[in-house]
Image (cartoon, rainbow, N blue to C red):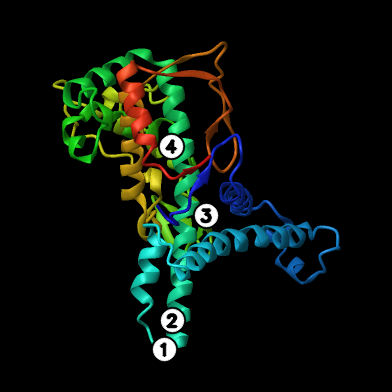
Amino acid sequence: MTYGLSIKRAEVGDPVIDMAERALYSFTAAAVPGIFWVDYLPILKYVPSWFPGASFKRKARDWAKDADGMLNGPYDTVKANQSKGIVQPSFVSYCLGNIQSTTDKEELMCEEEVVREAAGAIFLAGTDTTVVALNTFILAMVCHPEVQRRAQEEIDSVVGPGRLPDFEDRENLPYIQAIVYEVMRYQPVTPLAMAHLATEEDEYKGYRIPKDSVVIGNTWALLHDEETYGSHPETFNPNRFLTPEGKLNPAIPEPISFFGFGRRICPGRHLALSTLFAGIASVLHSFDLSEMGTLSLEYESCLQNRPVPFKCSIKPRSPQHAELIQSAVQFTIIDE
């Protein structure tokens, strides 16, 4: 979607995906507040990289290479392809096509830089978080086969086996939407929001917050609040978002804090929600998910909250579903 580039199969390995994973690791590590001594002793930023306690400088140098490679590599490939008349529909190709009429060279350079950085943000911010949320979904379905069966019954009654669900089905699939919300609430990808500074002194419920204090939103606490989402918030239960009649309950708020807070909230949240719905609905429509051996329910403790690697069985629900999956794959850009 972002670059329109073909991807290689998992067993081969894709250089763009590999580069993105390295860049995401770098960003995740750098975003943890207080991980380096320089966070507490700013004067360390003036010492050379070989100095004890200055490992942040060496790591930053390596991480910058990963970030630059992610920003420039795919973008330059799309631009080079366009100059050869090879255009795949994508965010970058669309934006580049719109700015090519700009005659001022300096203005064109600025606009291209905006496209480059916007594309990098879309790709990096949306890729890993969505994958982690889908991993939580798969684990939840394996652990709760009764939820999986009810979801498949709803999809079968609304969509049928002859096509995949689409966004027009969304209003008629309240249980699927409840599963999407519960995946976000049950194990939020970022239990703690990104750290920010208070721009001015403030007071909250008698607590003084000095200007320039580090403020971190507790996403986990908000999404596990019993007064908001009902009892036993530590359990996976999509019904908490539904009325007794099986409709989405307007009295239960969407788990929007999954995406952050205030003016710093994720600008791609609507796309992320749509992507999660499409992925979850399509998997439930076409596949049966089940256990394979002993299943671990543990999650890795880091800036991102992700399940530890686990094994499960993912099989087409029927020969008709398998044929539909093969047909859908033909429209996906994959290199053999």
| Left or right, 227 with reference to 3 | left
Please say whether residue 143 is visible from this viewpoint.
Answer: yes
The mark lying in front, picked from 2 and 4, is: 2
Where is mark 4, residue-wise?
Answer: 221
Q: Give the mark count.
A: 4
| Left or right, 141 with reference to 165 | right
Where is mark 2, residue-wise?
Answer: 108
How busy is the neighbourhood of tag 1: few (under 14 within 10 Å), some, or many (20 plus)? few
Where is mark 1, residue-wise?
Answer: 104
| Left or right, 160 with reference to 101 | left
In the image, residue 2 lies at what x, y percent?
42, 55
Task: Determine the secondary structure under disc 2.
Answer: helix
State which tag comes first along the sequence, 1 or 4. 1
Disc 2 residue type (three-letter): Leu
- Is the C-beta separation of discs 1 and 4 under 8 Å? no
State which tag comes first along the sequence, 3 or 4. 3
- Is the C-beta separation of discs 1 and 3 under 8 Å? no
State which tag comes first along the sequence, 3 or 2. 2
The mark lying in front, picked from 3 and 2, is: 2
Outermost residue on the bottom side: it is 104
Q: Residue at x 34, y 24 (%)?
A: 323
